[in-house]
Every structure is written in C-alpha cells, then in structure tokens.
Image (cartoon, rainbow, N blue to C red):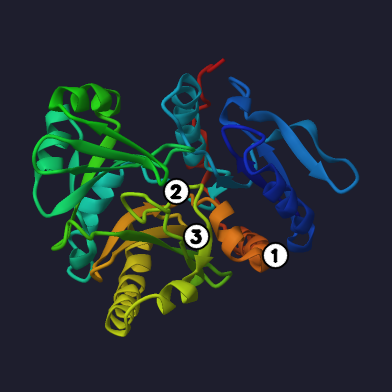
Amino acid sequence: MTSTLGIVTLSPQYEEIFTRQLAKAAPAYRLKVVRFTPLDLKPASNLIQGQIYTSSKGFTDAEFPIPDLIYDRCLYQHDAQSKKAKPIMEWLKKYPKTDFLNTGISNKMVLYEQLRLLPSLQPYLPVCSLLKEPSDLINLARKGGGYCKMQPLSQQHGASTYFISFDGTSTFTVQLSPKQIITFSRASEMERWCKKYIGRYFLQFFNTSNQKKFFINEIRIFLMKDSKNQWNRMGIHTKSPAENSLFNLTQKSAAVISFEHYLNTLQSHIKELLLDDIESIQASLPAFIDKTLSPCFEFAVDLLHTSEGRLFISNIKSKPGRSAFLKAFPEKENQLVRTILEHAHSMKSQRKEVSHEQKSLHHRPTSHK
C-alpha cells in the first residue's frame, strides 16, 4: 500500500528542485509525495489545498487529506506568515493519523543549557545568555579574552548571525559577513543597532588566549539516520577563510572546501586534537539528540575551530540546509534522497494504530485565513 509523504515549507519555491528529486524517486519506496504550506490546510476540515506529484505532469495543484507522513522543512521568520503558520504546525504534530519525520528546535539557548549537563560536551560549549537588553551584549563584548556571537533563538531561513569584538578602549566591531564589517565608536550606537534583536537572539562567548591573532574556521558535520534508525555521518566540510576579514568565519558567500584540505593546513598536534575532539562530540551528541529532539532523523552541528586549537559547538540545526553539503559533496545527492525515503519507508512500516478514543479527542484547527 502506498503512503503519502508531505513536504511542508513556508514557501512552495523553497527547495523546489530537491523536493522534485525526492518525488521522482518516491514510488520505488511505495511513497507518493505532496507539498504544501501550513496555510494550505483548509479551516474546519482535514483537507489541504496543495500540490501533488505525478511522473507525467510533475507537481500540480490538488486537494488531498493530511498526509500519513510529514517532513517538516518550515524555517520561520519574524513575520506575520510565520506567526500564523506556527500554531497550525503544532496542531498537525498532534494529529493522530500522521507521523512526523522530524521536529524543530524551539529555543537554542535552552538546548545549550541541556547540553551543559553532559560532562563529555562541557569543554566544547561557549557561555550563553539571552539578549534581554542592549547592555547584555555590550557587557559581554567588553569581557576580555574572547569574542561574542549573536544568533537567533530558533532556526530561521536567511537569518543572520553576528560576531562582535571590542578593542579594549571604545570601538565595537560587528562582522555582518566575511566582507562586511561595521564599527561603533560609542556604546549608545551599539545599543541602537541591537535593539531590534532583543528577545529573539541569544549571545555566545568564545574564550581565546590570543585575541590579537584569533581566527575562526567553521566546520559542519551532517548526520542522518538510516532505515535501521542508526546515525551515520553523511559528510563533514569546512569553508575557506575570507580574505581581509576580521575572522575566518564563513557565511553563504564563502567557498566550501573539503575537510581533508583543511586538515592539511593545520600543525600536526592541532590536527590530532581536532580529530579527537570531533570523535568525542560525535560519540555523545546523537544520543542526546534522540532523547531531546525526538522525532529527529537528521541534524547538522556547526563547530568553530580556533587558530589555537580550541573547538566549540556553535550551532545545532535540526532542519539543516542542503546547499553547502551538496556543494562539498555533489556526488551524494542521490544518497541524500535515498536516505530520506528509506527512513520514511521504515517509519511507515513501524507505525502503530492510534486508539479510537485518542482520535476522537483530536480537534480541528480554527480558521487561520
């Protein structure tokens, strides 16, 4: 019997090409693929006005019931659409006839606080605090011996992260991207800049013993579960340093390079330490993810590696992007598609029947349009 896998995003155009690849391969796993946005769920019904894929016509408009399986790729922003979509998605996650392949991280600072309870991960965690008022950022940036990073509490599409440093006298430097840096000579200017991020961002502080010659390289590890529910590393990559930038921290514009190439640039003792640290993180983090973010079958962990050999866990994404991964490993696109569909197929075969009482207690969402 064929089951329906629904790909839900905030925009039908998001990951359109990759979704098409999933849909083409799905019949081999007894799956058919539909795509929709949360706002496509019709009020007071269990029907969705979305798009369904057929081999002859591709994706076409169609009305269909809520899918058996849902793959959540919604990356929320600070806008009206996201505010409407979130409660609908929460309702869908409680819908008894549907299983989700994955879940999201609602608050990354809370996640870091939970990670800190694991002794094996404590050496890799930066100090974290919520951005409640501008003075929180200013005081942290003024703290000696390190750098401050601002990032959103939840994973957001296109949301920026910022590195902030203080020169020890009066100037604050904010790196918007490898090639874009702004400076503030007064604390009042810094306050005005960060006000719009209050309550939505949190702060991280990365210690370093050598602030004048401090460089950071970003390493990303991408992990997925196979059909037997075992975690496997799909790939690990880093990005090239940005020329003339304050940090060797990379953003979207930086070129992805192989991890092996990066290792070859390191001194032997730093290389050995890095590999040992990555092994320790990979030994502890997946089990924690299973316990804390269930259901979850994929995640990416971003690591900041300093020129002095320190390694920090700077970000964890339960809905990781694919562009950087496929840039580093273009030959793995089919494997990525296959792993997603194999996991969905295995979930379908393991589903448990929900009791009639549970189904009858599930209420439909209120109007959202």
User: CA–CA distance between discs 3 and 2?
Assistant: 25 Å
Q: Secondary structure at mark 2?
A: loop
Q: Which mark is residue 334?
A: 1
Q: Secondary structure at mark 1?
A: helix
Q: Position of residue 156 (x, y in %)?
A: 44, 38
Q: Is residue 360 left or right of residue 23?
A: left
Determine the image quadrant of residue 180. Answer: top left
Along the line of sight, which residue is nearer the eye, 210 or 222? 210
Label whose residue precedes the other's in the sequence (1 or 2): 2
- Please, what is the three-letter code of the amino acid marked with disc 1? Asn
Q: Which mark is residue 234?
A: none
To which residue does mark 2 refer? 251
When the figure is inspected, residue 148 is found, relative to residue 28, above or below; the finding is above
Q: Is residue 122 left or right of residue 221?
A: left
Q: Position of residue 139 (x, y in %)?
A: 10, 38
Q: Secondary structure at mark 3?
A: loop
- Please, what is the three-letter code of the amino acid marked with disc 2? Gln
- Please, what is the three-letter code of the amino acid marked with disc 3? Phe
To which residue does mark 3 refer? 297
Residue 361 in view (yes/no): no
Label whose residue precedes the other's in the sequence (3 or 2): 2
Residue 173 in view (yes/no): yes
Q: Residue furthest right?
A: 56
User: CA–CA distance between discs 1 and 2?
Assistant: 26 Å
Label whose residue precedes the other's in the sequence (3 or 1): 3
Q: Residues within 10 Å of mark 2 (few under 14, many from 20)?
A: some
Contact (Cβ within 8 Å) of mark 3 with mark 2: no
Q: Residues within 10 Å of mark 1 (few under 14, many from 20)?
A: few
Mark 3 vs mark 1: in front: 1
Q: Is residue 347 left or right of residue 277?
A: right
